Structure formats: structure tokens, C-alpha cells
Amino acid sequence: MIAIKSFGDQDQCRSEISKICARFALDAISLIDGSTSGDFDPESPEAKAYLDFREWLGPELVLLAQASIVSPVLSSMRVDGEGYVYIHSDLPEVQVQRSHVFVKAGRIAWLCAEIPSLDSAYGELYEDESEEAARICKEADALDLADEKDLSRADELLPRLEELYRYAQPGFRIYRGDKEAIAHAESLIEAAREKLRDEQQRRIDEYISSDASGEGHGSLEAVERFSAQLNEIDLKIKRHSKDLEALSFERNKILDDLELAEEALDASKTP
């Protein structure tokens, strides 16, 4: 395995990384713009404050991407002789302290946004469920979880919201045993099968036509070409299988040596 040491051309590589990180920053800011653009008048003081925030955020995102993503990935990257890349990171698992109230508020906000959207797009909820979802989402979205009474009400609504969210997923009426939905799905599957059969027959007819006319790619040429491609893939699989066998053998040998060393260590500790 070859570890990444440094850039071949420092200036050129750093410039390219900066461009990539800048693109990430622009995409992130565009995402924020899209979710906030309709919230205030472009001529208002709030809009001016947002523009100031935007100008500050962009460079910060570029630096953050370089420090938190690019540098750790490059420093932990290894490349083998076949050109395959491996990532071996020594970074510790991130331990984040989360307030259960914030987590619950975020989940409710997500569900209240997603359930109506899914229902509108896929129509998997039944009419009474759709009406119930609209009513519950409106109530839950208005709750203030800093208030104990509202927090208690959120605990009551959350299980039903989760259930409606699950029911609203595309195709979920099938899992609920809806006979009409199952019949519709079966008709779609059969139509797809028929389409595949037609496509397969079309390709066979093309080969037969080429065989008869002597023009285009005939069946014999196709058999030879696909056989050659298959042989090439088989050779690659065989080559990698040998590499895996060698690595497995080396690993087992190291395990044996480790077991002996641990046994010796235990014996040394025994009075």
C-alpha cells in the first residue's frame, strides 16, 4: 500500500482543491438561499443582514471543507498496486451531546414537512388518513416544546406522526395488503416484463437480420465479442482472488504470531 505523501505540484493541486471546496460552499449557500429567499423583502434590513451573513459564511465553509474533509481524507488515503484506494482513518468517533427536546423538535418539524409532501406526491394515505395527517401536522408544527404541556402533547402525537410517515411512503399500500394497490403493481410488473420480452426479441431479430444480410453486427461476431469481454473479466477476478489469498495467508500468519506473543506476555505476568 502506498501512503499519500504530498502534492506533486503544490500550487496547482492546492488551487484545484480550493475550487472544489469553493463549489461546495456555493452549493451550500444556494441551498440556504433556496430555503430563505421568500422569507423577507429583498430591500429590508433583514435582507441586508442576511447578505452580510452570506459573505461571512462562504469563506468559512471553504476553510471548513479543507480542514475537516479534504485534509483528513488525503492523509488517511492509501493506494495499492492495482490503483484501488483505501481509507484508514485514525480519527476518533465524534461524541455529540444532544438535547432530547431539540432532537424531538427537529424530528417533528421534519415529519410535519415530509408527510404532506409525500402524500401529495404519491397519494398512499387513504382519505381519512390524509385529513388526519393535515390536522396533526398543523397542531404539532405549532407546539412550543419549551412548554411542558406542549412537550407532553408532542409525546402523544409523535408515534402517530411516525406511523403516518411510514404509511405515506411510495408503494406502502401494497405492504398494508391493499388488494387494489397489489393488483395495480402486478399489472405494472407484467407490463415491464412484456416490454423486456419485446426488447429481447428485437435484439435477437437484429442479429438474425444481420446474419442474413451480412451487414452490421451478426450473432457470431456478438458471441465472440461478449466471450472475449467475459474472459477478460474472469482474468481480473482470478488475479484479485490471488491477491486476496495472499493477504489472507499473511493475516493468518500474523494472527498466529500475535497469539504466541500474547501467550508469552501472559506467562511473563504470572509470578
Image: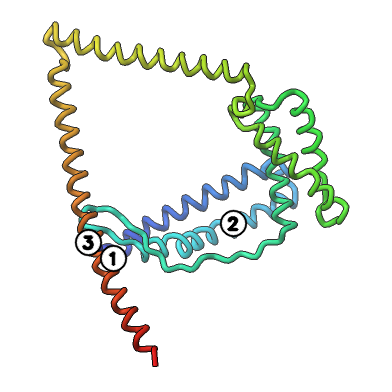
Tell which residue pokes out farthest to the front in this image: 271
Res 95 quadrant in image: bottom right
Which amino acid type is marked by label 1?
A: Ala
Q: Which residue is mark 2?
A: 55
Q: Is residue 186 above or below residue 108?
A: above
Q: Are marks 3 and 1 in contact (CB under 8 Å)?
A: no
Residue 70 versus residue 245: which sits nearer the camera?
A: 245
Q: Are marks 1 and 2 in contact (CB under 8 Å)?
A: no
Residue 75 versus residue 64: which sits nearer the camera?
A: 75
Residue at horizontal 72%, vertical 52%? 104
Q: Estimate the x, y position of residue 170 in percent, counting from the top left.
A: 59, 29
Q: Estimate the x, y position of residue 205 in percent, counting from the top left.
A: 24, 9
Indicate which label's residue lies in the foreground, 1 or 2.
Answer: 1
Q: Estimate the x, y position of residue 220 in percent, counting from the top left.
A: 13, 18
Cα–Cα gap, marks 3 and 2:
56 Å
Cα–Cα gap, marks 3 and 1:
23 Å
Task: State the mark number for residue 3.
Answer: 1
Which amino acid type is marked by label 3?
A: Phe
Q: Is residue 30 above or below residue 221?
A: below
Residue 267 versus residue 135: which sits nearer the camera?
A: 267
Which amino acid type is marked by label 2?
A: Glu
Q: Is residue 62 left or right of residue 139?
A: left
Quadrant showing the N terminus: bottom left
Task: State the mark number for residue 249.
Answer: 3
Ranked by sequence position, the earlier of labels 3 and 1 is 1
Residue 222 versus residue 186: which sits nearer the camera?
A: 186
